Amino acid sequence: MTPDEDRSPIDWETRFRDNDTPWERATVHPAFAAWEASGAFIADERVVVPGCGRSPEVLAFAKAGLTAAGIDLSPTAIDWQTDQFATAKQSARLIAGDVLAWTPPEPVDLVYDQTFLCAIHPRLRSDYETTLLRWLKPGGRMLALFMQKDERGGPPYGCPLDVMRDLFSDMRWRWPEPETISTWPHPQLNGKPELSAVLVKR
Ligand SMILES: C[S@@+](CC[C@H](N)C(=O)[O-])C[C@H]1O[C@@H](n2cnc3c(N)ncnc32)[C@H](O)[C@@H]1O
């Protein structure tokens, strides 16, 4: 088993090379747009997008004035991000590497998880939670989109709220009021709903 296969059941690099990427949206996620409109993005704050793939949100964060970083296993996806940033004359830290093995040079204010947690094998989830605790400042926020699905297996691996509440324990994370958690059907993934929630590291 190669290190990438150990980290993920899919050959992501080949998926990007083949443009076999049904999770991608044409524009930024509507939850991202709603968070931005609500003032959740603060200029000069540091944000990391784990498993950023070719998501346009990394550049959108930079355009909103944040110091952005994106990390992904796929060099093709990171090359795509690099080209986008060059064209837009913006800058970001773009890393081809393993989210679970990386540490930002300084603690960050924000993590934006969009179809990353649902893409890694559930046995890696607790490592991921530890990784986020390592990355974030106390009071730092995770903007999460938890993918919901009924079928067994994956990816995407479903992230039911009760399982998420166990993973992101109240001891380490402050959860939002339930009525602030919104539902966003994914247009390309059979309308599977994603639940948006902002979790704050204690
Ligand atoms: C379903 S895609 C989502 C991509 C992007 N977030 C988006 O919304 O378009 C999952 C991404 O996670 C990346 N990935 C999976 N496991 C990874 C890991 N351990 N470290 C870094 N990236 C990983 C894949 O290469 C892929 O780009």
Image (cartoon, helix red, strand yellow):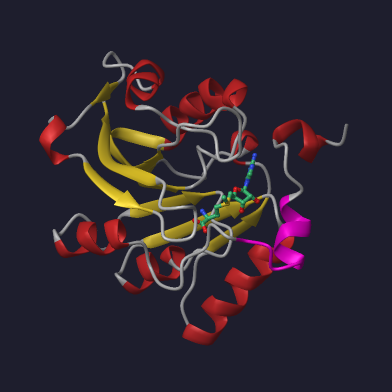
User: At 20% from the left edge and 54% from the top edge, which residue is drawn?
Assistant: 40
Is 63 placed above or below 112 here? below
Is 45 placed above or below 123 here? below
Residue 44, percent from left and from top: 29, 61
Residue 82, percent from left and from top: 61, 72
Q: Quadrant of residue 137?
A: top left
Q: Main secondary structure of the magenta part?
A: helix
Is 31 placed above or below 127 here? below
Q: Which residues are magenta?
A: 12-21
Whether residue 70 appears in magenta in the rendering, the answer is no
Residue 9, percent from left and from top: 72, 37
Is 123 placed above or below 107 here? above
Q: As rendered, which of 153 and 13 lies closer to the eye?
A: 153
Report whether residue 184 is seen.
yes
Q: As rendered, which of 97 and 115 lies closer to the eye?
A: 115
Direction from residue 143 to residue 192 in the image, left or right: right
